[in-house]
Amino acid sequence: MIGPVRAGQPWPRYRYRWWDGVNAMVCQQAFRDADTAWSNWLSRSREGLGYPRPKQRGRCRDSFRMPGVGLVPENLRHIRIGGERRPGGQKAFRVRLHRPAYRLARLLQRGGEVQMVTISRSGPRWFAAFNVRLPATPAAVATRAQRERGTVGVDLGVEVISATSRPIQLQKVATQLVANPRHLANARRALAKWERRKARRWVKGRPAREQSRGWHEAKDHMAKPHAQIAAHRADTQHHLTKALATQFARAVIEDLQVKNMSKSAKGTLEEPGSMVRQKAGLNRALLDVSFGEIRRQLTYKTAWYGSTLSAVNPAYTSQTCHRCGHVDRKSRRTRSVFQCTACGAEVHADIGAAHNIAARDERTATPGG
């Protein structure tokens, strides 16, 4: 409730009563983030940066950032939020962790310093992500085993997440084709059930925070499988990207424009699109695989483990024979079978595309290639 400021009464505590339950550093960091967003938008420091959008309660991810969070060293099972607890000062809390923070403790022993922490909720659980600044270390160098294996071409797709030009060790199995677990598709039936219940319990005209208890119950039931899907997808991506970054000296991928690939096909009223539902399903599968996230992980993991990452033009990689170089779209007989119409070579279509990706990088790296 907002009212006039009384003499002797602190301004924020009187005007905003919810302030008493929030650590001051949370609000200060939120103001700094808002100032950064406005400054970036006004200066146009990044291309495509839009107008700042405020968070809306109930329709955004619950999270906050703050400095001054430390690990309690005696048992590694607690973090201290808000600095040291002192009477009459800022609020400080000790929060118990689900498991000991051994990794964070090792970083602090190496001279790391906690700069910021982001506390967020994913489904029914809360997570703390620490931003730790480490002293400068020498750049990583590829190992002998990585140099011996050389370059690997990676073709990302929907039927299989990745096809590689050389076998990779994944879960102690050597393979060139990594199957797509289809995490979202397997959970869609359960999600659709609670989505229908959530839609039936929505009262038109009310904001989300004023909806019924049944609507919030359905919303909480949907949050848990969504969090599980995100965790399983991240697990698959991290296993793949680490294998590529640690087992080879160079990884080559296609320079895919995911935003253009996942555009809607519905068109306009004057020119309606065709096969809209089929394209929507393809877009859903593309975003479930997350090509952009795989490339982002490869970018920083290759720097960690001494390897390098390269991106090549994806044009005609799946229509070119990796043996004779003949380009013909008819050579790809089915989704997985590629049989060259010129030399008759037969190979899995995605593996052939991975060979073309690696060969295209070698031609680009060679002077005059």
Image: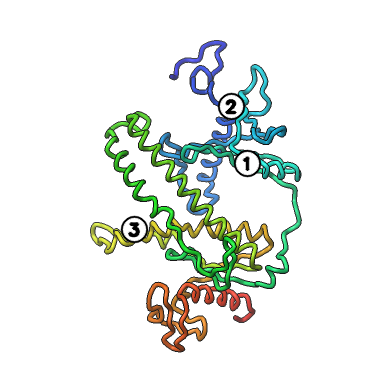
SS category of the residue bearing label 2? helix
- Residue at image point 51% right, 17% down: 14
- Residue at image point 44% right, 84% down: 340
Label 1 near label 3: C-beta < 8 Å? no
Judged by depth in the image, the label closer to the viewer, 1 or 2, is: 1
SS category of the residue bearing label 3? helix
- Residue at image point 43% right, 82% down: 339
Q: Is residue 34 at least partly visible in the picture?
A: no
Q: Quadrant of the C terminus?
A: bottom right
Could you say where residue 46 lies in the image, as x and y percent from the top left? 53, 52
Could you say where residue 267 lies in the image, as x and y percent from the top left? 29, 59
Label 2 near label 1: C-beta < 8 Å? no
Residue, disc 3: 280
**As drawn, is 368 to the left or to the right of 318?**
right
Q: Residues within 10 Å of mark 1 (few under 14, many from 20)?
A: some
Q: Which mark is residue 130?
A: 1
Quadrant assignment, res 142: bottom right
Q: Please state which amino acid type lies under the numbered disc 1.
A: Phe
Could you say where residue 116 lies in the image, as x and y percent from the top left? 63, 39
Q: Earlier in the sequence, mark 3 or mark 1?
A: 1
Q: Quadrant of the N terminus?
A: top left
Judged by depth in the image, the label closer to the viewer, 3 or 2, is: 3
Residue, disc 2: 24
Q: Earlier in the sequence, mark 1 or mark 2?
A: 2
Instruction: Judge whether 37 appears above or below 9 on screen.
Output: below
How far apart are labels 1 and 2 at the CA level? Answer: 19 Å
Quadrant assignment, res 145: bottom right
**As drawn, is 253 to the left or to the right of 203?**
right
Q: Earlier in the sequence, mark 3 or mark 2?
A: 2
